[in-house]
Image: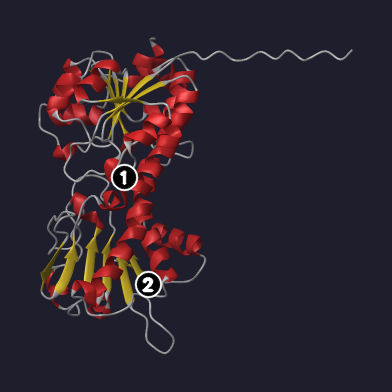
């Protein structure tokens, strides 16, 4: 008689206790793991502890998480006390760092310009391992979190501009795009990276005339290739840029600085020459902005007018569509957490996962990022050497 084939079932090497504290940063509405992915992690044998109300801003209720198999905690202290892996969107505050336990692993953004000077010292003193989302790379060498949030910010920036062109928001009363027999609106996009690409896609989809400026011919060429249609592109030359801003209905600031502040490429005089009622959406405002007239706003009071031009300068555009952004983050972090459990913990995973290793800046209380060490005058060690010594 035929016999059943006996297949070996792989044993799980480690069970993670994952903690998700509620975000307390101003207007941070995202959550790093959605209920569907929590259920997946729980089914793989991991424990997930979620602070009550963590998902409310993204329209995920405590009930959704408990049904997915998570435990609900009623204080941040409880989460930090009982989890060995903390995952959150914004960096922890100094008060939250006090709750952390030695040898914990922290996944969060770093957002270094917004951190107090003793932020790094507190993490080092706690002997934790800290990983910055924005520095994690995938198999192709791309920063997946920056890419995902850039896609969201690019598409959303065009929808924001469409809102402020309408009469409802005291705009000029124009439709973004146009109709048969009526000239389309003009959109000038400064920057041909991920944000610029997805802003261009959204604007073209609505029927607008799109003009893209960037300092890199390579990025402009890449944009032409991926768009599948010929669009106006130009190197950032002040006279040419000023000429096209005069006729633009919408200007999107999508430049990114490799380090330091975004270059100011649009002067106040250029803004003065723009049409009354036109809209500026400065997505680069988190790095200082590329319009001289820009200043930081928030989701409560997102716009101001200067020289008759509407300025939208909210640094955290992704929180405006927090549910979509939460799903985007969750699809990135769930495989990382699964891999971490399968490898038996962070140390074993870092041996094989170069992409996550790139995001580590503190490892067991040792600063491993040379740039941060030089910036804050702290000693640092090479992470590759520390991992090889395990």
Q: Is residue 198 visible?
A: yes
Q: Is residue 38 above or below residue 315?
A: above
Disc 1 or 2, which lies upstream in sequence?
A: 1
Give residue 58's mark: 1
Query: With respect to residue 23, does 202 lie above or below?
Result: below
Residue 281 placement: quadrant:
bottom left
> Mark 1: which secondary structure?
helix
| Residue 212 higher or lower than 26, as above or below | below
Q: Nearer the viewer, residue 176 or 115?
A: 176
- Quadrant of image for the N terminus: top right
How far across and how far down the image is residue 21, in percent? Answer: 25, 29
Residue in the picture at 17% in, 66% down = 311
Q: Nearer the viewer, mark 1 or mark 2?
A: 1
Q: Quadrant of the C terminus?
A: top left
Decide: marks 1, 2 in contact (CB < 8 A)? no
Instruction: Give the percent coordinates (x, y) of residue 72.
Output: 31, 26
Question: Of residues 178 and 390, which is closer to you in this image?
Answer: 178
- Residue annotated with mark 2: 210
Mark 1 and mark 2: Cα distance apart in space: 32 Å
């Amino acid at each position: 008689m035929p016999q059943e084939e006996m297949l070996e079932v792989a044993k799980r090497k480690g069970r993670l206790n994952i903690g998700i504290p509620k975000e307390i940063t101003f207007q941070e509405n995202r959550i790093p793991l959605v209920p569907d992915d929590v259920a997946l992690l729980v089914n793989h044998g991991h424990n997930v502890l979620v602070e009550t109300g963590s998902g409310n801003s993204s329209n995920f209720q405590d009930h959704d998480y408990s049904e997915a198999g998570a435990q609900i905690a009623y204080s941040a202290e409880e989460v930090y006390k009982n989890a060995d892996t903390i995952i959150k969107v914004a960096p922890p505050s100094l008060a939250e760092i006090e709750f952390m336990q030695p040898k914990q692993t922290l996944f969060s953004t770093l957002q270094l310009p917004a951190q107090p000077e003793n932020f790094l010292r507190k993490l080092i003193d706690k002997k934790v391992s800290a990983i910055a989302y924005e520095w994690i790379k995938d198999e192709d060498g791309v920063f997946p979190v920056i890419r995902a949030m850039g896609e969201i910010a690019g598409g959303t920036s065009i929808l924001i501009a469409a809102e402020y062109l309408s009469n409802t928001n005291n705009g000029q009363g124009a439709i973004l795009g146009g109709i048969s027999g009526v000239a389309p609106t003009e959109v000038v996009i400064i920057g041909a990276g991920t944000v610029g690409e997805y802003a261009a896609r959204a604007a073209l989809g609505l029927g607008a005339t799109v003009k893209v400026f960037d300092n890199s011919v390579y990025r402009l060429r890449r944009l032409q290739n991926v768009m599948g249609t010929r669009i106006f592109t130009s190197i950032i030359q002040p006279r040419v840029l000023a000429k096209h801003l005069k006729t633009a209905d919408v200007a999107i600031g999508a430049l990114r600085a490799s380090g330091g502040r975004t270059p100011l490429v649009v002067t106040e005089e250029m803004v003065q020459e723009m049409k009354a009622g036109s809209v500026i959406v400065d997505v680069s405002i988190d790095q200082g902005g590329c319009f001289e007239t820009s200043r930081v706003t928030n989701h409560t009071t997102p716009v101001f007018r200067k020289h008759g031009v509407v300025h939208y300068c909210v640094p955290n555009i992704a929180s405006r569509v927090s549910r979509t952004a939460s799903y985007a983050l969750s699809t990135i972090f769930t495989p990382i957490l699964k891999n971490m459990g399968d490898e038996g913990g962070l140390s074993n995973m870092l041996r094989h996962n170069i992409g996550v290793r790139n995001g580590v800046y503190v490892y067991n209380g040792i600063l491993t990022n040379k740039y941060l060490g030089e910036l804050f005058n702290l000693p640092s060690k090479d992470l590759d050497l520390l991992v090889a010594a395990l």
